[in-house]
Image (spheres, grey):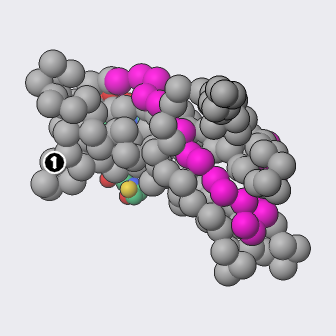
Amino acid sequence: MTTPQIPTVNTINRGLPAGKMPELRMMPAPSDANVYGDVFGGWIMAQVDIAGSLPATRRANGRVATIAVNSFVFKNPVFVGDLLSFYADIVKVGNTSITVQVEVYAERNRLQANTVKVTEATLTYVATDSDRKPRKVPPIETLIHP
Ligand SMILES: CC(C)(COP(=O)(O)OP(=O)(O)OC[C@H]1O[C@@H](n2cnc3c(N)ncnc32)[C@H](O)[C@@H]1OP(=O)(O)O)[C@@H](O)C(=O)NCCC(=O)NCCS
């Protein structure tokens, strides 16, 4: 009797960061491309902003507003049909602000497991109250799901 083959972690992750969950997975459509067939940088920036806001909102336990895009690098082009994974990690928590690093990977030619890092960005969000004014980020121990 032969032992069934169990896929390795690398096979499962297909070149994506091991042991991490993406905040978003998206596939750009033809309407997201420029005249050269590459995906608009602005479309990628919008998704990065959304992905970064998710851990910031959880950490702030409420609404946040983007105050700054500190850095943004398009390392490789994105093509229609790429499967994009957006990973977002909080790198700094201030009095009212939360800074998040976002990394984006594209799985292209997916049957060949060809994965490339396409974007790296750092954004800062501010926790805001119902009047859209800055409020203190709550202590982490008060959060149910930090
Ligand atoms: C977000 C907003 C409420 C903050 O109000 P503000 O009076 O400008 O805020 P403050 O000057 O008190 O700064 C708030 C925090 O942001 C940080 N901050 C300010 N400017 C920054 C910058 N350029 N880069 C990084 N952080 C910055 C401050 O250091 C402070 O952090 P801390 O409290 O952790 O020390 C206000 O700027 C705003 O409404 N901006 C528009 C937001 C928006 O429309 N975003 C797009 C859609 S979400």
Answer whether residue 86 is magenta in the image: yes
Quadrant in the picture for residue 16 = top right
At 25% from the left and 29% from the top, the residue drawn is: 146
Q: Residue 91 or 105: which is nearer the viewer?
A: 105
Q: Residue 41 or 131: which is nearer the viewer?
A: 41
Q: Magenta stretch?
A: 74-93
- 114 up-or-down from 45: above or below: above
Residue at disc 1, secondary structure? loop
Left or right: residue 144 versus residue 56 is left
Asked if the beta carbon under badge 1 is closer than 8 A to the nearest atom of ligand 1, the reply is no
Answer whether residue 61 is magenta in the image: no
Our reading of the magenta stretch's main secondary structure is strand
At 64% from the left and 53% from the top, the residue drawn is: 84
Q: Position of residue 63 (x, y in %)?
A: 24, 49
Q: Residue furthest right?
A: 36
Q: Which residue is mark 1?
A: 129
Q: Position of residue 117 (x, y in %)?
A: 74, 40
- 95 up-or-down from 83: above or below: above
Quadrant in the picture for residue 92 = top left
Report crowding for label 1: few under 14, some 14 to 19, many 20 or more residues within 10 A (C-alpha).
few
Quarter of the picture containing the N terminus is top right
Q: Position of residue 142 (x, y in %)?
A: 11, 24
How many dots with numbers? 1
- 18 up-or-down from 134: above or below: above
Q: Residue 138 or 82: which is nearer the viewer?
A: 82
Answer whether residue 70 is visible to the viewer in this image: no
Left or right: residue 49 versus residue 141 is right
Quarter of the rendered structure image containing ligand 1:
top left
Answer whether residue 1 is visible to the viewer in this image: yes
At 59% from the left and 56% from the top, the residue drawn is: 45
Q: Position of residue 145 (x, y in %)?
A: 21, 32
**Amino acid type, residue under disc 1 in the picture:** Asp
